[in-house]
Image (spheres, grey):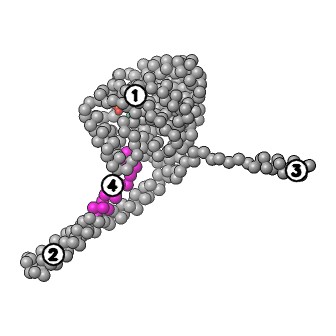
Amino acid sequence: MGTIWLVIPCYNEQEVLPETAKQLKKIMQDLVKRGKIDSDSRIAFVNDGSKDATWSMIEELHEKDELYAGINLAHNRGHQNALYAGLMAAREYADAVISLDADLQDDVGAIEQFIDKFNEGKDIVYGVRSARDTDTWFKRGTAHAFYKLMKMMGADTLEDHADYRLMSRRALEALSEYGEVNLFLRGIVPTIGFETDVVYYQRHERFAGESKYPLKKMLAFAVEGITSFSIKPIRIITGLGVLLFSASILLLIYFFVVWLRGHTVAGWATIAISVWGIGGLQLLALGVIGEYIGKTYLEVKHRPRYCVERLLYRKGEDKEKGSKEEKEA
Ligand code: UDP
Ligand code: MG
C-alpha cells in the first residue's frame, strides 16, 4: 500500500481530458477500494501551456473532486519538461508516481501491474509495448531505426519503452539530482539504477484529438536523445581523422617511391600529399577539440556521480551498554 500519483502531461487535450479523467478515476477508486493504494492518491494533470480549454477543465475537475490535482506551466515547454515538472511536484506527496499520456494510448489496464511490482519492492517499473500493430509502418520503422541508432551511439535505452513508467520516491529524488536542462527522460532513468522491472502492455490508438508529435518534433526528439547521451559522434570524427592522417603517411611513402622512379608529373606528389595530410590533420584537430567540448558538455550537466541505494550502519549500542553495566557491577 502506498500513495500513488498518476502524472499526465497535457498539451491542447480538451478533446480527451473528460474521458481520460473519467476512466482513470474509475481505476483509482477501484484500487483504493481493494486496498492496493492509499486513499490520498491523486491523478495529476500537468498543463503544458495549452492554448485551448485544457487548464480550465483541470481546474474544474479539481474543484469537484480532490482526487484530481493540477499543475499549470506558464508556457509550453514540451512533453519531457511537462512530465518532469509533474514528477518533481508529485514526489513531495507520493510514494510512487506513474507517468502516462493524456490520450490513454498507454493501456490503463496495466496500472495495477505497475503498483504490484512497486509493492514487491521495485523502484522503477518500465512499461514496454508488446505490439506495435496500431502504428503505421512508417512510425514502426522509424522507431525501430531510432532505438538501433541510440544503442549504437551508446545511450542505454529500453526498446519500445516510452514514458509510461512507475518511479518510487527515492528514484525521483535521484532523478532530481540530474542537473541537465535538455531532458531525455527515457535515457536518463536507466542510468539511475535501483531494482527495476518491466510491465508489458498493448498500445492503443489515440481515441480523440491529434498527435502533438509530428515528424518534425519526433526528429528533434531523436537528435536530442543522441546528443544528450553520447559524445560518440565526436569520437567518430576523431577516428576518421586518425584514419585519414595514417592514410596520408602511407601515401607519402608511396608517392615518394613513385617520385624516385621518376614516373610523376612535376608537382603532383606535393599537391596530393598536402590534400590528404592537411585534410587528415584538420579532422584530427577537430576531433581533439571535440573531445574537450564533449568533456565540458558532460561536466556542465552536473549529473550525480553515483546514487547510494542503501547504507548499513549501526551504533555500537550493545557494547557500550555492556561496559557500563560491567562498571556499575
Ligand atoms: N504533450 C505535452 N507537451 C507538448 C506535446 C505533447 O505535454 O508540447 C503531451 C500530450 O498532451 C500527451 C503526451 O505529451 O499527453 C504525448 O503526446 P502525443 O500523444 O501527442 O504523442 P504521440 O503519442 O503521438 O507520440
Ligand atoms: Mg499519443
| Front-most of residues 71 and 120 | 120
The local crowd at label 2, few if under 14, some if 14 to 19, many if 20 or more residues have their Cα within 10 Å, is many
Nearer-N-terminus badge (2/1): 1
The local crowd at label 3, few if under 14, some if 14 to 19, many if 20 or more residues have their Cα within 10 Å, is few
Nearer-N-terminus badge (2/3): 2
Which circle marks residue 2 in the picture? none
3D distance between C-alphas at marks 3 and 1: 63 Å
* Amino acid type at image mark 3: Glu
Residue at screen point 49% across, 25% down? 112
Indicate whether 54 appears above or below 143. Answer: above
Q: What residue is shown with label 4?
A: 233
User: Which one is closest to the eye, mark 4 or mark 2?
Assistant: 2
Q: Which residues are magenta?
A: 223-241
Which quadrant contains ligand 1?
Answer: top left
3D distance between C-alphas at marks 2 and 3: 92 Å
| Element class at badge 1 | strand
Q: What residue is shown with label 1?
A: 201
Left or right relative to 193: residue 102: left
